[in-house]
Image: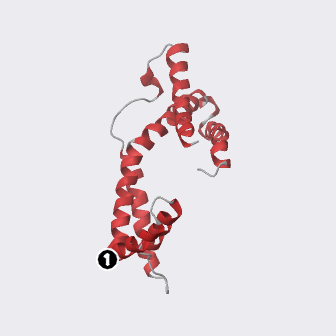
């Protein structure tokens, strides 16, 4: 299901290319396929990290709150996955406990780095498919409605497009 959903994310771009090149006979660059630095991309990468760190720092101010070291979450997922034999879970738990207080920060760093890398590679490429179709071509075609009305129409199409994913517990 996830593989099909990922491929579906590319179909708005395919449709945009077909319309732009095949019907309108205009260059692909007209639908927004331009590669230049955008400071908003930097903000998009850094803002979630800043929000996560702010949340952690704010949680320290709440009485009786502690940051989980992640050991229980990791070992529970390993046990539930069935990949690791139940007999080995205790040993893995002991090894993870050896990291002590640094483990949450290692997990935060690993999650952050992998999230940024995935965001700018695999997820970025898939999202580009939707952005080219929905935001670039469709938003441009509906520009005569004005920004807010065209945004609502595009949002409705986007929502309907994602409805099967939402109904399956994603998004």
Asked if residue 34 can be seen in this view, the reply is yes
Give above or below for 116 relative to 106: above
Asked if residue 43 can be seen in this view, the reply is no
Label 1 sits on residue: 98
Q: Position of residue 163 (x, y in %)?
A: 67, 43
Which residue shows up at 37% across the image and 56% down it?
Answer: 46
Q: Quadrant of the N terminus?
A: top right
Q: Position of residue 159 (x, y in %)?
A: 65, 42
Quadrant in the picture for residue 60: bottom left
**149 horizontally vs 49: left or right:** right
Give above or below for 23 relative to 160: above
Q: Position of residue 132 (x, y in %)?
A: 50, 32
Q: In the displayed image of the protein, which residue is found farthest to the bottom? A: 63
Which residue shows up at 50% across the image and 13% down it?
Answer: 25
Q: Position of residue 138 (x, y in %)?
A: 58, 30
Q: Residues within 10 Å of mark 1 (few under 14, many from 20)?
A: few
User: SS at mark 1?
Assistant: loop
């Amino acid at each position: 299901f996830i593989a099909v959903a990922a491929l579906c994310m590319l179909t708005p771009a395919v449709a945009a290319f077909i319309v732009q090149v095949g019907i309108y006979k205009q260059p692909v660059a007209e639908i927004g396929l331009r590669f230049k630095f955008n400071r908003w991309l930097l903000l998009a990468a850094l803002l979630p990290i800043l929000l996560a760190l702010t949340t952690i720092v704010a949680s320290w101010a709440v009485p009786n709150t502690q940051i989980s070291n992640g050991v229980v979450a990791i070992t529970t997922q390993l046990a539930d996955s069935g990949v690791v034999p139940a007999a080995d879970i205790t040993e893995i738990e002991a090894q993870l406990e050896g990291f002590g207080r640094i483990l949450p920060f290692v997990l935060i760093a690993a999650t952050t780095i992998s999230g940024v890398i995935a965001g700018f590679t695999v997820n970025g490429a898939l999202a580009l498919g939707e952005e080219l179709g929905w935001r670039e071509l469709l938003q441009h075609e509906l520009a005569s409605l004005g920004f807010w009305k065209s945004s609502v129409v595009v949002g409705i199409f986007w929502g309907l497009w994602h409805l099967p994913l939402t109904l399956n517990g994603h998004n």
